[in-house]
Image (spheres, rainbow, N blue to C red):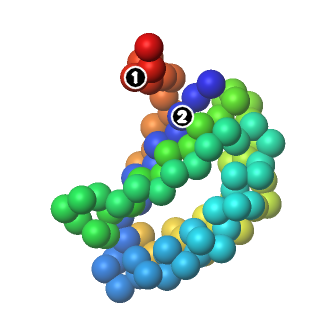
Amino acid sequence: MITRIVKMVFHPEHTGLFLDLFGKHALNMQEVAGCLSLQLQQDANDPRIFFTLSTWQDPQSLEAYRQSELFRKIWTLVKPLFSERAQAWTTHTIYDGKN
């Protein structure tokens, strides 16, 4: 299992549009084979900064999504809204807080 963390910084005037787009596509994203969960977080101090945290069954599932028509469609709509280049990390969970 892996987690993909993507940091996105938007032009202030585009945050509402991003939230609308995310709302329209979140269910489709979660239904992709191998996607176990999807979260959207907003920075507590800077409302222009958002993070997606998605958990995937394996790296191949994430890569299949990244090569999909759904990803290309969403990315084409969202990318022009950025004020900075997006940053992404793929991580393995070491500790999840459960006993």
Gap between marks 1 and 2 measured at Cα: 15 Å
In the displayed structure, 99 sits above or below 29; it is above
Residue furthest to the bottom? 13
Numbered disc in front, either 1 or 2: 1
Indicate the amino acid at tag 2.
Thr
Looking at the rendered structure, the number of numbered marks drawn on it comes to 2
Q: Is residue 72 in sight in this rendering?
A: no
Image position, residue 67 (x, y; %): 75, 49
Indicate the amino acid at tag 1.
Gly
Name which residue lies at 74% across and 61% down.
28
Name which residue lies at 23% across and 65% down.
46
56, 80: nearer the viewer: 56
Task: Kindly state the secondary structure of the residue where label 1 is placed.
Answer: loop
Q: Residues within 10 Å of mark 1 (few under 14, many from 20)?
A: few
Task: Kindly state the secondary structure of the residue where label 2 is placed.
Answer: strand
Which residue is tagged 1?
97
**Quadrant position of residue 20:** bottom right
Indicate the quadrant containing the N terminus: top left, top right, bottom left or bottom right: top right
Which residue is tagged 2?
3
